Each structure stands twice: as C-alpha cells, then as structure tokens.
Amino acid sequence: MNKIKKILSIIDEQIIFWLAGFLIVFIPLYPKIPLFSPIEQYIVRVRWEDIAILFTVIVWVIWWLRKKVTINIQFAKLIGLYLLFSFLSVVSGIFLTKTIPLEAIHIGKSLLHFFRYLEYFTLFFILYSAIKTKKDVIKVLIILAITLFGVTVYGLGQRYLYWPVYSTMNREFSKGIRLYLTEHARVQSTFAGHYDLGAWLVIVLPLILALAFTTKNKFIKLSLHLLHLGGLWLLVESAARSSFAGYIIAVEIVVVLFAMQRKKLLAKFWYFLSRSIFLGLSVLLTMIYFGDSMIERLVQAIEPIPVLAQSYKAFDQTRIALVDQTFGRLPALFPQANKPSNGISTDEAVQIIVSSDERPTTENPKDKPSDVYVNVPDYVQVATISATGKTEYITVAQERTYSANALKYGLSFAIRLDTLWPQAIKGFTTNPLLGTGYATLNKNVVYLFTEADGTDNNFLRTLGETGGLGFITFYGLIVLAIIQAAKVVKKNQDQLLTIMAIGYIGGSIGLLINATYIDVYASSKVAYTFWALTGLLINYAVIVEKKNNLSEDFLKAKSRKNTAFKKAPKNTTFKNAVTPKRRKRKNV
C-alpha cells in the first residue's frame, strides 16, 4: 500500500513534466498525418499532436485548480490581451467591416485560427509549470537534442532512402498523401513543408551551438557540434532562403554575446574571430557539397543585380568542379533504395496541385520565371448555369501566365509583391485597430471561401488580421521575452541560464528575420517549440532569481548573527548577546 501511495505521489508531482517532455519530442517528430478535418473544405486538420496537447492542458488545468502549478502573471496578461484583441477582430470582421460573412463556415474558419493561437500559447504555460529544478531544465535540453537528432536522421532517410514525405502545401496533400522526394526536391523531414523545417531549425540550432561552445565535457562537446552540423546540413537541404539568412544572423549573435562575456578586449576579439571562422567554414563546406538547391535559390534572389549574379554563378561553377574532383563518390556510400510503390514523387505531385487565386498575370504566357521549371496549368473556378437555373462552379485548366515581377524576381517573391502583401496592407487600412479578422486576407471577394490562408510575412499578416492592437500585444510578448533574456545575460548569475538566454536571443531574432518572408508564428510545429522554449527560459530565470535571493538573505542573516556574537561579552551566551537591554532590565 505504501508503494502504491509513493508511486501515485511521484506521478502527482512529475506528470506535468513528463507530458511536457513528451510534447517537446512528439510534436516535431510525428509527421503531419491527419485524423479528421473540422472544416472539410479547409486545409487545417486535426492531428495527434492536438489530442496530446488537449490532454496535457486538461491535466494542467486540474493541477492549477489544485494550486500545484504556477503561472507568470506578466506574460499571462499580455497573452490575454492579445487573445482579447484577436477575438474582437473576429467580432469586428463579422459585424463592423463585414469581411467575415455571417455564415457558419466562414465564422468557423476564423474561430479555428483563434483557437489555434490559443493552443500555441498553452505550450508556454505547460513548460513554465513543468520545470522545478535545474535537473529538469537539463532533461528538457537533452530531449530537445534527441529530437533534433531524430529530425536529422529522418531527413537523411527522405533524401537517400525514399522515406515518406507528408506535406500540407495544399489541401490535397494535407489529407495525408504519401510522397517521396526526387533528386532535386527540398528536404522537409517530419515537417509539413521545407519552410517550416527551416524556421524550426532557426530556433533550435543557436541553442545547440551555444551549449556546444560552453560545455567542458569533450564527448558532449563533440556530440553537440556534430548535431549542429547535421542540423546545418538539413537547413541547407531545405533550401529555405529566409531561414538560412535567419540562421546566419542568429549564430553570429550567439558568437557576439559569448565574446562580450570575455573580460579583456583581445580575448573578445579572438573569441569572435575564431568562432566566426569556424562557423563560416562549416557553412561554406556544407554549401559546397550539398547546397545545389540553396545556391540556386540565392542566385534567383540576386538575379536583378547582374554583377552579384555573375559572381555567384562563377563561384557555382568552381564549386561543381571541386565537388566532382574531391567528393564525387560520396553519394555511393549511401545504400541505393527502391522507390516506394505506395507513394508518388514530388514531381508527379506538382501535377495535382490545385490552383489558387494568387497567380500574377502577364501578356506573354510562354515566358516563365526563373524558379518555374514545369509548365503546370492554372486551374480556376468558373461559374456556370445548370439547366435548372442553379449556379454551379466547375474547375477549368487554363494556360498559366505570369506578371512582370514574376519574370524579374521569380514566382515566389512576385506572389508576395503582387498579391499577398498588398492584401494584408489593405486589411490593416480597413480597420487599423483590429484588422479584418483571421483568414480574411486572401479573398478577392468577401463571400469567397479560400481553402488555405497565408501572407508569407508574419508581421503583415498580424497587422492585416488583428490590426495594430493585435500587432503590439503579440510582438510585445516576443520583445518582452528577449528583454528578459538580455537581462539574464547581463547579470550572468547562472552559467546554464546564461547559455540558454544567449541561444534564445539568437534564435528569437533569427526567427523574427525569418518572419519577414514566412508566417513562422502561424506554423504549428514552429510556434509550439518557440513558446515552449520561452516558457522554459522564463521559468528557469525565476528559479535562479529566487535561489540567489534566498542565498543573499541567508548570508545577510548569518552576517548579522556573526556581528552580534563578536560584540557579546565573554562568558555570555549568544542569546543574551543579541538582547543585552532585556537582561539589564532584569537586573534592575
């Protein structure tokens, strides 16, 4: 009976931590295979990660009612304000701006996004409550490192062994269609797209690198560096340009902050130089051998600048020659796998991509942007009148045309310039305080139901959907977390906390840079991990602060006692020494 009580007591104390650790590893590693769709016509689907989070939240709420978990009031207020403003933006979209039609399917889609953000924020509270000691923090970091290893291994399997790819790049893929990568396709590992994978790596890699720079155990240091290099390979194979730029800036921030910890100016300079060279060589070698797609994407970005484009192409030719001469046999080291019979290739999948209303047009359909390799027709919905007089919509294939921006900058950037970003700005100007509501920025007509929503710029998306109030509160949360981390670095009270804060600052700023081109904070696997790590850092900072305050109080109390003892007369007890006046009154 006593053993059962002891087991139940351990479960009672540790269950939130166990569930939090499970979510850290399960959310990134489990592919986005759907269970069911809350709105059948829409791309967003319910998955096992949602069920796991729901169960954890139920347990967390019960434990909160039992007063066994705590919350951070400062962050809770800001999160509450953002959720209030975002809910008001939906109400405003229905009744004020009328950008959300008063129909169940449209209101349901907007509320679905509202509850998704609410779900993302729960990871902050779960991790904040789960951590009680430094050992708990170390365990979470080990779990995160194991997760990165698993994501990298799965990426290798996708590239060389035809392991399954599950994408949500469009509604058909989001149903759980099993794909496999072709030779030049972008690796996305267990994520729903290569952009999501790249953004997740921007958060995780700076933290792993920070730990690798500072640990004294040689085996752990080597393991962390190899893990970082594996993640770098995965980032390069994803060919996500904005994530790559965010990563470069993030790791340099890590190097600079560690260099600033040195006392002497020469030591600061040498630390910065040596680590920067090390990272530069790591990136260069990875790009030389594995960076075909990434280099091609970078060249497309600088194509309008002839001098840079020509220089880059010259470097690429040298790179190809070097690879052929020195590493040409490396792919033979990997076993040759057979293509799966129960899946389709990513090239074949292009043919079933349904169209959107976001394609720019041009007068010459024969011209193609630099990032378009296959002539895929544009599928559009056309209204027809049936024999009974009922209006019906049919899908018609038309020859795809492209805008001047698409021909100049590539299709990817042109879609943003011509359609997505202007529509988000229009949403903000329609209602500067509250925006036009969730899932309203991709519609040309108010009553049009879009099967997917995105802006490819998280700042503009937040402004367009939730207005200035939503923008200030949402990014105010991120800025507040970065400021708190900066204070931790400045105080330098605990080595592990300082390392985590430096990695967090680098990753957070890198993710903000990534957000200029991708809706990273609306990507589920990315958002879950970001808010979880934020809760982890903030709570550990509180734990360290409390510990230091208790130590200071103890030392002050001890100092007062020692002082009183020294002043006491000989042959006097310590008790009498601290109350001499009372003894004097007794004698009187």
Image: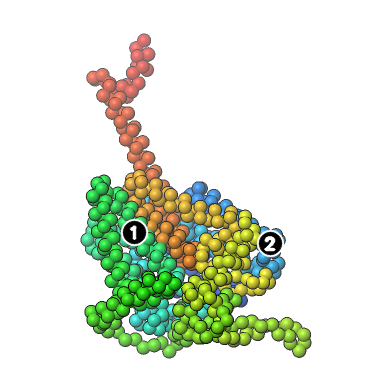
Question: In this view of the protein, which residue sits in the foreground, 25 or 186?
Answer: 186
C-alpha separation, residue under disc 1 versus residue under disc 2: 44 Å
Residue neighbourhood size for the residue with mark 1, other residues' Cα within 10 Å, grouped as few (<14), some (14–19), many (≥20): some
Circle 1 — which element? helix
Side (left or right) of 285 relative to 352: left
x and y percent of residue 332 in the render?
Answer: 27, 84
Which residue: 57% across, 59% down? 463
Residue 252: which numbered mark, if any? 1
Circle 2 — which element? loop
Q: Quadrant of residue 421?
A: bottom right
Which residue: 40% across, 63% down? 246
Mark 2 sits on what residue? 97
Q: Farthest right residue? A: 388
x and y percent of residue 472 in the render?
Answer: 54, 53
Amino acid type of the residue that numbered disc 2 sits on in the rendered structure: Thr
For residue 140, above or below residue 550: below
Q: Quadrant of the C terminus?
A: top left
Q: Is any part of residue 37 visible from this angle?
A: no
x and y percent of residue 75 in the render?
Answer: 50, 51
Residue neighbourhood size for the residue with mark 2, other residues' Cα within 10 Å, grouped as few (<14), some (14–19), many (≥20): some
Q: Quadrant of the N terminus?
A: bottom left
Which residue: 42% across, 49% down? 484
Question: In this view of the protein, which residue sits in the foreground, 469 or 338?
Answer: 469
Which residue: 48% across, 85% down? 374
Confirm or deny contact between disc 1 and disc 2 (CB under 8 A). Answer: no
x and y percent of residue 431 in the render?
Answer: 64, 58
Side (left or right) of 140 relative to 471: left
